[in-house]
Image (cartoon, rainbow, N blue to C red):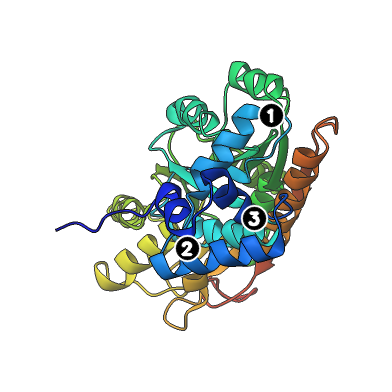
Amino acid sequence: MPRKSITSYDVAKAAGVSQSAVSRAFSPGASISKPTREHILKVAGEMGYQPNAIARSMSTARKDIHQKSGMVGVIVTRLEDPFFAQTIAEFSRGIQAQGWQMLLFTVDTEAEVDTALNTLMQYKIDGAIVLSAILSDQMARACNTQGIPVMLYNRSAEGLNASSVEIDNHEGGRMAADILLEAGHTRIAFVGGEEGDATSTRRQTGFEERLAEAGRQIFRHETGDYTFDSGREAALRLFARKDRPDAVFCASDVMALGVLHAARNELGLRIPEDFSLVGFDDIPSAGWAGHALTTIRQPVRRMIKDAVDNLVESMESPALPPRIRRFEGRLIIRNTVRQVGSSSP
């Protein structure tokens, strides 16, 4: 038999008090005598009662538009990506440390962001964080009208009434080009994200720009979807040709690890002897001894702290204007790029 859920009515009846007294007993700062609170909490504990925090926060938020629900809505795409799993964990810790709770909503594509945010708004969220996706101008205005500040993470917010925190993707692309040019590579391929993906486009633009300054251009361009398998498949296509690249830059570490796997285990190639490889993000597995991937590191903890601090300030002071922050990446040199001065394969 399913266990009966204990309600505030059951606690009130057992304690000999009103339901409103039970509610006040579980509300910090509410008007109730200390002996009565202690009595109610003792009875509730013996019965195994716990109040429904979400229902209570939604109820108080409906009664007073200035009342905080204590909930922050978070929308994320590509949750299966290790980089985003790490990011969500950091956001959860940061949001809880500030006294809020996180309500997570996953979507498959950017086209679903507006619908997801509209659903989250029905839970009377105090603020919203959108990871690596963008919302429409119409939805941004709707959030602004309802006093819900929005933080875009890993996306630019130009033209929207929203704050943003992102890595300097353009400069990161230039860093990747620099290390490969310095190593003497001439046939440099790029494995990017899906067509129209803003993050990949900015990384590619910076990469191409720096190559052009050195009199080079992208040798081959393959497209993936930020997954291990898409990186593996891109590698198989790149190295199926006679005119193979001598270096590959991937728009994410996950795709770069797919390239690494295909090269070593299916194509019998050596890295960096046969070609150099650079990723982007510096996910934990990029530094594993079996990978030792050269990559562009995102200062994830600093970026997330900045994003959470800014969102909390905006939730507490709605009149604050949106703020755009861009962080510099850092080149992490490991074992997948040949040393400067080595001869080309």
Q: Is residue 182 visible?
A: no
Which amino acid does the dot numbered 1 rest on? Asp
Crowding around mark 2 (Cα neighbors within 10 Å: few <14, some 14 to 19, many 20+) is many
Crowding around mark 3 (Cα neighbors within 10 Å: few <14, some 14 to 19, many 20+) is many
Would you say the residues marked 2 and 1 are in contact, meaning their CB atoms lie under 8 Å apart? Answer: no
Q: Which residue in the structure is indicated by mark 3?
A: 95
Q: Is residue 223 visible?
A: yes
Mark 3 residue element: helix
Q: Nearer the viewer, residue 258 or 210?
A: 258
Viewer-nearest of labels 2 and 1? 2
- Residue 330 quadrant: bottom right
Residue at image position (19%, 56%) is 2
Work out how far the residue at label 3 is from the one at label 1, CA to CA, in angstroms.
23 Å
Would you say the residues marked 3 and 1 are in contact, meaning their CB atoms lie under 8 Å apart? Answer: no
Residue 77 on image: x %, y %:
45, 43
Residue 325 on image: x %, y %:
78, 44
Which amino acid does the dot numbered 2 rest on? Ala
Label at residue 44: 2
Q: Which of the two labelled residues, at mark 3 and mark 1, occupies the earlier sequence position?
A: 1
Q: Nearer the viewer, residue 196 or 131?
A: 131
Residue at image position (45%, 25%) is 115
Q: Which of the two labelled residues, at mark 2 and mark 1, occupies the earlier sequence position?
A: 2
Residue at image position (71%, 27%) is 147
Work out how far the residue at label 2 is from the one at label 3, CA to CA, in angstroms.
29 Å
Mark 2 residue element: helix
Residue 107 on image: x %, y %:
41, 38
- Residue 244 quadrant: bottom left
Viewer-nearest of labels 3 and 1? 1
Which amino acid does the dot numbered 3 rest on? Ile
Q: Which residue in the structure is indicated by mark 1?
A: 64
